[in-house]
């Protein structure tokens, strides 16, 4: 017989509320405390422009290092994930997508984080003007897939959403090394 507890959380106590996340404590049917971090969700975009993958390089304080990753950002309240992906691509790279294809909706850390991360493939791209959010600092880099594959092999790309989007796109035949 399975020992899995199958129940929806009841009666949450908010332990922390911040700009990006809210931490809640639940008690399960066995009286055990379960903690969950709620996040608004995010969208990320894999874009191939003129034979190169569009990436952004930015310092990530949680990692204490610069990270190279696909353009991404959090969802605004009530925002459609596809619209968020479109917005982030334009803000960070200056590219506009004529079409976005959903690659996946992921749970990055389902044991503690209630966040859905939507991954998109961008098609029919055209150049526009980048408009970074206030306080956002990043460099846009365009890289041939073969070079990116080498960086992955060397362990230089560690961002999970970027790795997932690249692999899903590759398996769907949208991208090849």
Image: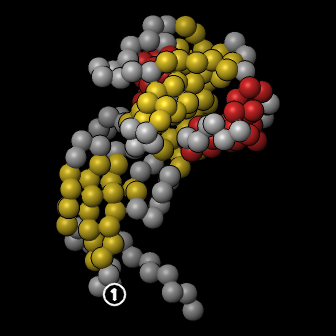
Q: How many marks?
A: 1
Looking at the image, residue 96 lies above or below residue 37: above
Location of residue 50 (image quadrant): top right
Q: Position of residue 139 (x, y in %)?
A: 49, 18
How busy is the neighbourhood of tag 1: few (under 14 within 10 Å), some, or many (20 plus)? few
Determine the residue positioned at 47% across, 35% down: 65
Can the viewer see residue 5 in this picture?
yes
Quadrant, the N terminus = bottom right
Quadrant, the C terminus = top right
Mark 1 secondary-structure assignment: loop
Looking at the image, residue 22 lies above or below residue 72: below
Looking at the image, residue 141 lies above or below residue 146: above
The colouring scheme, among rainbow, by chain, secondary structure or one colour, is secondary structure
Location of residue 47 (image quadrant): top right
Can the viewer see residue 174 in this picture?
no
Using the image as rendered, state which of residue 45 and residue 17 is in the foreground.
17
Asked if residue 35 lies left or right of residue 70, the reply is left
Using the image as rendered, state which of residue 151 and residue 69 is in the foreground.
151
Q: Position of residue 96 (x, y in %)?
A: 52, 15
Location of residue 54 (image quadrant): top right
Q: Position of residue 175 (x, y in %)?
A: 75, 30
Using the image as rendered, state which of residue 89 and residue 100 is in the foreground.
89
Q: Position of residue 27 (x, y in %)?
A: 28, 77
Using the image as rendered, state which of residue 96 and residue 111 is in the foreground.
111
Q: Can you identify the residue that label 1 sits on?
A: 30
Residue at the far front in the pictured view: 64
Looking at the image, residue 86 lies above or below residue 63: above
Asked if residue 119 lies left or right of residue 175, the reply is left
Determine the residue positioned at 72% across, 21% down: 144
Determine the residue positioned at 42% across, 18% down: 91
């Amino acid at each position: 017989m399975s020992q899995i507890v199958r129940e929806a959380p009841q009666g949450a106590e908010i332990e922390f509320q911040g700009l990006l996340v809210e931490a809640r404590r639940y008690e399960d049917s066995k009286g055990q405390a379960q903690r969950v971090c709620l996040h608004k969700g995010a969208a990320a975009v894999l874009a191939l422009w003129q034979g190169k993958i569009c990436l952004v390089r930015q310092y990530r304080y949680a990692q204490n290092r610069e990270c190279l990753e696909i353009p991404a950002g959090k969802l605004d309240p009530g925002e459609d994930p596809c619209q968020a992906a479109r917005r982030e691509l334009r803000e960070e790279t200056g590219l506009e997508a004529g079409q976005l294809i959903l690659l996946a909706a992921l749970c990055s850390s389902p044991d503690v984080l209630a966040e859905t991360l939507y991954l998109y493939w961008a098609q029919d791209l055209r150049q526009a003007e980048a408009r970074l959010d206030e306080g956002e600092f990043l460099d846009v880099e365009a890289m041939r897939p073969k070079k990116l594959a080498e960086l992955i092999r060397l362990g230089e790309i560690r961002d999970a959403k970027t790795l997932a989007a690249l692999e899903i796109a590759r398996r769907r035949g949208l991208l090849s090394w």
